[in-house]
Amino acid sequence: MSNKHSATLLVSCPDSQGLVAAIANFLLTYNANILHADQHQDAVENLFLMRIQWDLHGFSLPMESFAAAFAPIAEKHNMSWEVSLSSRKPRMAIFVSKYEHCLVDLLHRWRIGELDCDIPLIVSNHEDCRGLAEFHGIPYHVISVNKDNKEQAEAAQWALLEAAEVDLIVLARYMQVLSHKFVERYPHCVINIHHSFLPAFDGAKPYHRAFARGVKLIGATSHYVTEILDDGPIIEQEVMRISHRDDVDDLIQKGRDLERVVLSRAVRWHLENRILAYNNKTVIFD
Amino acid sequence: MSNKHSATLLVSCPDSQGLVAAIANFLLTYNANILHADQHQDAVENLFLMRIQWDLHGFSLPMESFAAAFAPIAEKHNMSWEVSLSSRKPRMAIFVSKYEHCLVDLLHRWRIGELDCDIPLIVSNHEDCRGLAEFHGIPYHVISVNKDNKEQAEAAQWALLEAAEVDLIVLARYMQVLSHKFVERYPHCVINIHHSFLPAFDGAKPYHRAFARGVKLIGATSHYVTEILDDGPIIEQEVMRISHRDDVDDLIQKGRDLERVVLSRAVRWHLENRILAYNNKTVIFD
Amino acid sequence: MSNKHSATLLVSCPDSQGLVAAIANFLLTYNANILHADQHQDAVENLFLMRIQWDLHGFSLPMESFAAAFAPIAEKHNMSWEVSLSSRKPRMAIFVSKYEHCLVDLLHRWRIGELDCDIPLIVSNHEDCRGLAEFHGIPYHVISVNKDNKEQAEAAQWALLEAAEVDLIVLARYMQVLSHKFVERYPHCVINIHHSFLPAFDGAKPYHRAFARGVKLIGATSHYVTEILDDGPIIEQEVMRISHRDDVDDLIQKGRDLERVVLSRAVRWHLENRILAYNNKTVIFD
Amino acid sequence: MSNKHSATLLVSCPDSQGLVAAIANFLLTYNANILHADQHQDAVENLFLMRIQWDLHGFSLPMESFAAAFAPIAEKHNMSWEVSLSSRKPRMAIFVSKYEHCLVDLLHRWRIGELDCDIPLIVSNHEDCRGLAEFHGIPYHVISVNKDNKEQAEAAQWALLEAAEVDLIVLARYMQVLSHKFVERYPHCVINIHHSFLPAFDGAKPYHRAFARGVKLIGATSHYVTEILDDGPIIEQEVMRISHRDDVDDLIQKGRDLERVVLSRAVRWHLENRILAYNNKTVIFD
């Protein structure tokens, strides 16, 4: 697959005439074979957003010179941009507590190649998932967290993440709230799964509250973590029908299937550089 | 179809041994051919709920004697119950403002026999839908509502509803909030369609707020109207996928398809005596 | 809305370097403000497909000169292309037999502006829907069709379509099979709704066959009509859950909701120039 | 949970008056606390089907005497019936080839208690999934199958299944077709997952054929295995939306999520005695 040696450029900037032409001409100058291109214009915010992926085979600009060569265009149009190479696998940490269903799912998808990344470590506040981690050959670090040691615990987590040069943190039903300080370090790099259809039932015990309210569908939401709990940019959501025959335990069981699918899609899209977040929303270039 | 001459019994009572046997034996005594039966036990609330429909052909108990004959069983088990005859069509009023999509849908379903009821009147606070009502041969009453005349307007509406002996009121995108006094008169007999996935985005402008929050699915909810706005027992919900390519107008357009389907299902289930409401929830015997 | 004076270009051609740049540069030359752009590359077929819509306000090339100005690019890259102006409404004919649910739906969407087209005529082989057509002020032509008069009937239909300068024909549950000769005249301009999830249950009585097979979901499919029955390029599909409690009549009733939504989406996408058909498939630029 | 000591009775028989009363009275005689009851009448086939589950705590009939005590009722009404005790876990064998996604899913659900059964063995024609089986502590047997040794291979499989006293065989993407002789031994006790929305794309390479046909949704189907390939009673189906941006590999990847959910639901329903199969269809008492 030629995708194996490709580059992906994500761009966002104020909308104006000539943006597509400017980027297309730049790439053409160096003989880029474009594999996929997608763009979006937000008319309300006057924003232009683009994702463009090209084959590096035959591309005549060395990627170490890309930034310098692209700078004039980026400056002229006031672009935020980021380029990723398929040859460099993103490094992903997984945080988990006791519920293993999301972890099982992520590790399985990783093992069969559905998630193209390295997983240098799994962090947990419990021992429960160690066997699973070891079966997959991934270091498993237990750092207990309680009311009194939160700061030290996060410092220890941070040290591990730094040492492992992690690009992405996935909270796979990790039941501790991260501090503002922690979250600020990883803007749009921490993905959480919340077990409700946000903004309904944010916070604790969403399945119990969904049951109490008598909703006819339950949901799950993956989102980037920000300082406000369950409020970050939504990446993906899915729902499932329930009925009066379902009690809270049934909701929890059915919800697990939602959580896994919704979290793994978000993770894959992030790893494939398909997500642009702005204004507390996301654009998914699928 | 034998359904044309059938009776439907809805029962709710504290759960105890022998309830199914008691009801089944009672009906068997009079040679009832049971067409459909469904029951539900709410273990948390210790409630037993049942819907049972039987053919009146060959049923040896005259329906005018049903209440007296069934009373001993009902009293023994502390039952709430209601029996409906397929030969008596429910009488439904529709309230509408300017958006016609739900009205068009209800009238079409009624005309082709999908909604088995009489529609003695349509009430509106605007003239817009008169043509549609007249095309279907249904009296159309315009009663303006504003801040100052709400009480008189509701009195006029109520007089119409009383005169028409209405059993069910459907708010098909009727944009006025009904008073507590009005709602109290029709417990579990007023069905509303709210254009969001409740409890998310209750209140005004749900599509605008869904757009602002960046959700990936929009929804619609039909529910019985209670004193608290958008808080009554949910009857049906449905969602639809949206993307960053959809602006608020797209959400409104896509949402119309949800609203129609979700409202019409609720109305049909109500007309077919499939709904039991308790504890601010519903059981749907489908 | 600036969309009201916009142009939309649909292009398909063999994939090669520089296509996006060529089209973007061409439009930039004439100061086009691009409103939406979307492209797709079919790696297997080595095809490039693009839809690009721009504001005509400020566009310095008169549209009557577009073809001549674009010709060199089109020829160089061997493009098939078509440009549509928002100022010219497409002209749509609807064919219907006795079932009115799709017709009601299309006419409602048209009346509220969801389908941006003119409807110069409705053609039927029965009188049933005349009232509906007249309520909407649309001429209604009944042309009986039977085994013996098919050729004459189609000649009469064709004469009506020609006189009305129709661009699109929608078969809204029209129960007659069109001849090859008829279909050939309107390549990718006749949209049909089939009441199954194609390719399952093509041909007659799909709901009866779905019931007999015991499927757990029923579907509907909108597609362009080709010479082979129920085999043309699929535009849209949707499904709905059923259960053992549903008999054939329930399937037919539930299926109506699918048919309406699936047909109307296809019609809207066609009217908005969002569909490119090739290789008996469609690309939907949404 | 009282469910832990419950009995479940599945009954099917010709429909007639007094069936519900007969069963309810029988259970009441022995003080059964009914936990769940559901019944279905197939008016076309004149069949009555029932599932009834009761608490064994306080039930005064010893279960070893159930058959004798129930026999008069069963004979009078010509019933087929089966009673299962929650205290006896069903024994399930899993067959798998190389694709592990369904196996991973089933084993995870089993480990967290979602599938209430014993898994005495996994049978495969390849070594690939041995590690996974061993991690879960389940014996893994490799029996190679080719054109020439099919009969001996099945004999070996059968010996293993007999020794393990297996009640249910799940084909979790097992890529060999079982012989008629083999299937006949396990009527309605072999569950397969087919990676299409049956009856569309039965047989080989369904994702490739779905791609070639240009469908807009892909599906998966779990069903009981019968002598005719991909033709047995359908237990569950689910679909997922795809677009022109998805190639065959994307369909395969997306389809894995369908296959897992659809297979696991079927297995759970079977283990919970929720399925009654007749006339090449299933009733699911959920």
Image: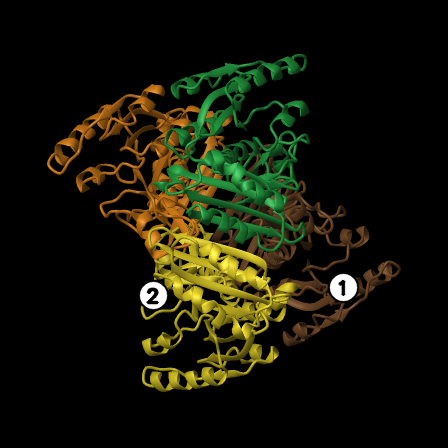
Chain colours: A green, B brown, C yellow, D orange
Which residue occupies the foreground of this view, D57 or D179?
Answer: D179
Residue B162: mark: 1
User: In this picture, is C197 found above or below A172?
Assistant: below
Q: Secondary structure at mark 2?
A: loop
Q: Are marks 2 and 1 in contact (CB under 8 Å)?
A: no
Parent chain of label 1: B
Looking at the image, can residue C3 be seen? yes
User: In this picture, is A71 found above or below C173?
Assistant: above
Q: Secondary structure at mark 1?
A: helix
User: In this picture, is C100 found above or below A45?
Assistant: below
A43 sits to left or right of B112: right
Which residue occupies the foreground of this view, A150 or A23?
Answer: A23
Which residue is pictured at 67% across the width and 60% down the height?
B172
Residue C203: mark: 2
Q: Check the image and name the residue furthest to the right.
A: B148
Residue type at the position of mark 1:
Glu
Residue type at the position of mark 2:
Gly
Residue D270: mark: none
Could you confirm whether marks 2 and 1 are on the same chain?
A: no
Which residue is pictured at 67% across the width and 23% down the height?
A181
Of badges 2 and 1, nearer the viewer stands 2
For label 2, the crowd category at 10 Å Cα-Cα, with few meaning under 14, some 14 to 19 and many 20 or more, is some
Parent chain of label 2: C
The picture places residue C133, in percent across and down from the top left corner, at 56, 78
Q: For the residues marked 2 and 1, what is the alpha-carbon distance in whole angstroms?
A: 51 Å
User: In this picture, is D6 found above or below C121?
Assistant: above
The picture places residue D216, in percent across and down from the top left corner, at 42, 54
